[in-house]
Structure formats: C-alpha cells, structure tokens
Image (spheres, rainbow, N blue to C red):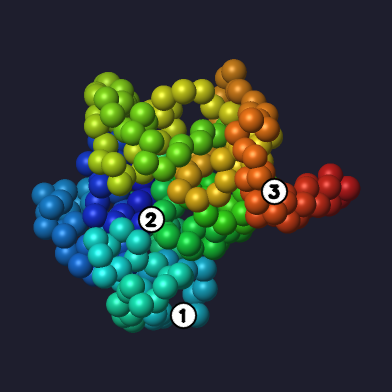
C-alpha cells in the first residue's frame, strides 16, 4: 500500500496526480477557504477514504496547539507563517500539529511502514518541517522541498538521501506532456497546473545528480522557488553539477553570502561524524 503526504496542498493542484500514484493521500492545508475548496472538488475521493484532508498549520513544536497564520488577501498561493509584509494578509488563529507526529499517526492508522513520497511546500517553514522529519527518522522513498532558505541545503547535505533532481519553479518543461508511471505500473501522459509542484522522482524528465551537486546548483541559481527532489536510492549514472561562472556576474557573491554559512555547518557536521 502506497501513501503520499502533500504538505501544503494549496488549491489541490497536485492531488489528481498523487491519487494516480498512491492508494491513499494525506493532504495538509492551513487555509480554511482552500480546504473547503479541496473538499468540494475531491468529494468522491474523500468519500472513498483515498484522500484525507487536514486543516492544520504544520510546526515543529508539539506544545503549541494554535498559532497565528497569515492568509493571503489574494489568491491564497502565498499564505504563510512568516509574512514579509503582514499588511497583505489576514491573520487568523489556526489549529497546529507537529509534522512528525501527524505523519506517524497516519502510518499507524493504515499500518504502513514505508512512505512513497512527501512534498514540502510551506512558504517559508520548509526548513523547520524538513528538520523535524529528519530528526525523527521519517525518510520517505522520495521527498521534495522548496529551498528559500540555506538551512534546507545543510539538512539535505547531512541527510541519508543519495540522488537528487532540481526543478526551477515555474519551469513548464517539467509540467507539460509528462509521461508518468501510475501505481499499477501503467504509463500515462499528464499535464500539470503552472502553480503545481509538478511530477516527483522518476517521473521528472532528466537525470539524477549526486549529493556534491547541491551546493554548486544553488551557487549557479540562487535560493528561491526551486524544488529539490530527493531519492533514498542511489540511482545509476548519477550526474555532477559544477559551478558555472558564466551564469553570474556580481550575483555570485550574493548567492555565496546566503549559502556559505550553512555549507560550513554541514561540512563541520560531516567531519565530526567521521571522527566518531
């Protein structure tokens, strides 16, 4: 039995795809209006108990039961715990839950040991959720996370994940006419919404890269709306990304300044493990 966790389901842009890939999908969304929309659009799957919706804010602290969440005044795509400009948001108290406990609860309910995929897209809280999962040894076969903060790089460099793909947000090359493998092994052609995270894992066109490619990728491209897709397996013919000076002029110093402290911490951690 395959299970997928969609952490940051938003409008449900990925749910039709996930329901083709797994037997059950747990969709977590903090915005109550979007939850109502998902429940309406996916009622059949909810009634069939293939889709479960959780209207909670995901955090990494089990002691907090409700928290201020900032709901976008626009289309809901950027609702967040960490608004850059609070005037563009409505503030509302929302029930919250520690991510690792939520995941383990559903693994127990369905008596599942292995997770097919976890998607983390939580508008600024991604590093906190990733840290919580890794510390609690929750390592799905596939995982993706947005990289707005350098802590994500540090966590993945120190993780047990072995193979990686990098997807630029908004790049429709990875979202149009994509050949996917559904749960019964058949192949289908799928088109993804421009605001969706698109395919994951082996469904993403192109090769996998080794762990040493993570830092050069972000030196080349910077942080932001960029998804790192991780596989627990060491894929064959792993590629390697080198730093490309031609991609920047003055941008290199900016990217290096953002990323270097986390890289140093990651390297120190690896050295300490080797000494033990």
Q: Residue at 36% across / 77% down in the picture? A: 87
Of mark 3 and mark 1, the one earlier in the sequence is: 1
Q: CA distance from mark 2 to mark 1?
A: 19 Å
Q: CA distance from mark 3 to mark 1?
A: 39 Å
As rendered, which of 143 and 50 lies closer to the eye? 143
Name the spot of residue 152 as percent of width and height, x first. Answer: 58, 52
As rendered, which of 121 and 170 lies closer to the eye? 170
The residue where tag 2 is placed is 7
Q: Residue at 24% across / 51% down in the picture? A: 12
The residue where tag 1 is placed is 64
Q: Quadrant of the N terminus?
A: top left
Compared with 18, 80 (above or below) is below
Name the spot of residue 162 as percent of width and height, x first. Answer: 61, 34
Disc 3 versus disc 1: nearer the observer: 3
Q: Residue at 83% across / 47% down in the picture? A: 271
Contact between marks 3 and 1 (CB within 8 A): the answer is no
Name the spot of residue 146 as percent of width and height, x first. Answer: 48, 50
Disc 3 versus disc 2: nearer the observer: 3
Report crowding for label 2: few under 14, some 14 to 19, many 20 or more residues within 10 A (C-alpha). many
Res. 253 mark: 3
24 sits to left or right of 40: right
Of mark 3 and mark 2, the one earlier in the sequence is: 2
Query: Which image quadrant for residue 99?
Result: bottom left
Name the secondary structure under disc 3.
helix
């Amino acid at each position: 039995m395959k299970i997928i966790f969609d952490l940051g389901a938003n409008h449900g842009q990925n749910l039709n795809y996930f329901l083709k890939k797994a037997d059950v999908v747990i969709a977590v969304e903090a915005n109550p209006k979007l939850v109502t929309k998902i429940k309406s659009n996916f009622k059949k799957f909810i009634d069939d108990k293939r889709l479960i919706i959780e209207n909670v804010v995901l955090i990494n602290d089990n002691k907090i039961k409700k928290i201020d969440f900032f709901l976008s005044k626009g289309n809901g795509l950027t609702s967040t715990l960490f608004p850059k400009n609070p005037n563009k948001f409505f503030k509302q108290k929302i029930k919250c839950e520690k991510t690792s406990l939520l995941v383990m609860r559903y693994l127990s309910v369905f008596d599942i040991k292995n997770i097919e995929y976890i998607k983390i897209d939580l508008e600024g809280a991604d590093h906190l959720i990733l840290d919580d999962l890794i510390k609690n040894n929750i390592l799905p076969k596939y995982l993706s996370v947005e990289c707005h903060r350098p802590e994500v790089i540090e966590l993945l460099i120190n993780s047990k994940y072995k193979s990686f793909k990098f997807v630029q947000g908004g790049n429709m090359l990875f979202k149009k006419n994509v050949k996917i493998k559904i749960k019964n092994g058949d192949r289908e052609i799928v088109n993804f919404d421009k605001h969706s995270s698109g395919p994951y894992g082996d469904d993403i066109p192109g090769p996998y890269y080794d762990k040493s490619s993570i830092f050069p990728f972000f030196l080349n491209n910077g942080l932001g709306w960029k998804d790192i897709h991780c596989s627990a397996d060491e894929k064959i013919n792993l590629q390697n990304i080198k730093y490309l000076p031609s991609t920047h002029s003055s941008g290199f110093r900016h990217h290096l300044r953002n990323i270097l402290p986390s890289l140093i911490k990651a390297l120190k951690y690896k050295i300490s493990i080797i000494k033990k």
